[in-house]
Image (cartoon, grey):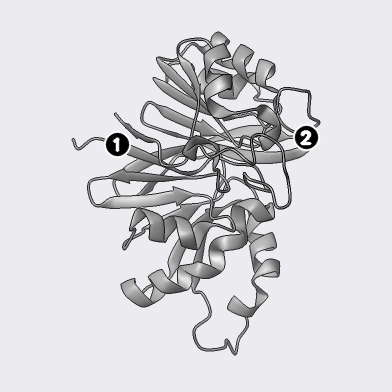
Amino acid sequence: MEKLKITFLGTGTSQGVPVIGCQCDVCKSSSKFDKRLRSSILVEQGKTSFTIDAGPDFRYQMLRQGVRDLDAILITHCHKDHIAGLDDVRAFNFLLKKPMKVYATTRDQKAIKTEFSYAFGENRYPGVPNFELLELDTKPFKVKDIEVIPLKALHKTMEVTGFRIDDFAYITDTHYIPPETLVEISDCKIVVISSVRRTPHPSHYSLDEAVKILEFLRPEKAFITHVSHLMGKHDEVNKELPDFISLAFDGLVLEM
């Protein structure tokens, strides 16, 4: 079995880091670890590859990573920082001569059809993106030969979908992970969850809340993503975290 490879394409919040016009120390930082595109990961194993989410930076992320083949896109939820880049699947449609498989819940499919209505009309304009929308619910499924287990969590009152792939779990944009999901990922070796800042937030974990969840799960390694400029500088925050927890960063590669 070939290794599972996870690449963090982006680790920032909806505004990214730096934030337009902001003059805080994080946004002015010259460190590459404080430059964060919108959150997304690339999953690869053998000849199979897919992303989780396709936000506004999707085009640049694909170019930066040199991606030429992509089997699918998995959607955590339909907020713009997670789906706005779907228009750019047009390039893959052209290269691969087929629709892009997009796994999304019924709610998120409806939002995608509204947001990209020009891609779903009867008389579609030449060159618009071509999607194959596939139902995402609680049942495990396969992207070619990679098994994926959907995980449920809450983003304030909005249900979002996380994913378990082998011994890796990824849950972003949440302030509550239900007990059944915690059980589902309790034996994962690597767990990624989100935290936007140190102080409480109505729809995201604070840093302390995220750390408490990860200390409860106690995987071999844990990473925090969807980080805002309010969190602080990457290197300084990492010094405060337990030894098995780190802030993720754009370009981070995990192999397992």
**Residue 177 horizontal side relative to residue 34, left or right:** right
Residue 146 screen position, x and y as percent: 33, 43
Residue 97 visible in image: no
- The residue to which callout 1 is attached is 4
Residue placed most toward the observer, 232 or 182: 232
Residue 119 screen position, x and y as percent: 59, 77
Label disc, if present, on residue 156 of the rendered structure: 2
Locate residue 27: give its quadrant. Answer: top right
Which residue corresponds to the image point at 47% horizontal and 41% vertical from the top-left?
A: 250
Residue type at mark 2?
Lys
Which residue corresponds to the image point at 57% horizontal and 44% vertical from the top-left?
A: 137
Label disc, if present, on residue 62 of the rendered structure: none
Residue 1 screen position, x and y as percent: 18, 35
> Is residue 221 shown above or below 45?
above
> What whole-number distance in Å separates the C-alpha atoms at marks 2 and 1?
32 Å
**Quadrant housing the C terminus:** top left
Residue 248 screen position, x and y as percent: 49, 31
Which residue corresponds to the image point at 76% horizontal and 33% vertical from the top-left?
A: 203
Q: Which of marks 2 and 1 is nearer the N terminus?
A: 1
The local secondary structure at tag 2 comes to loop
Residue type at mark 1?
Leu
Residue placed most toward the observer, 206 or 82: 206
**Residue 195 horizontal side relative to residue 186, left or right:** right
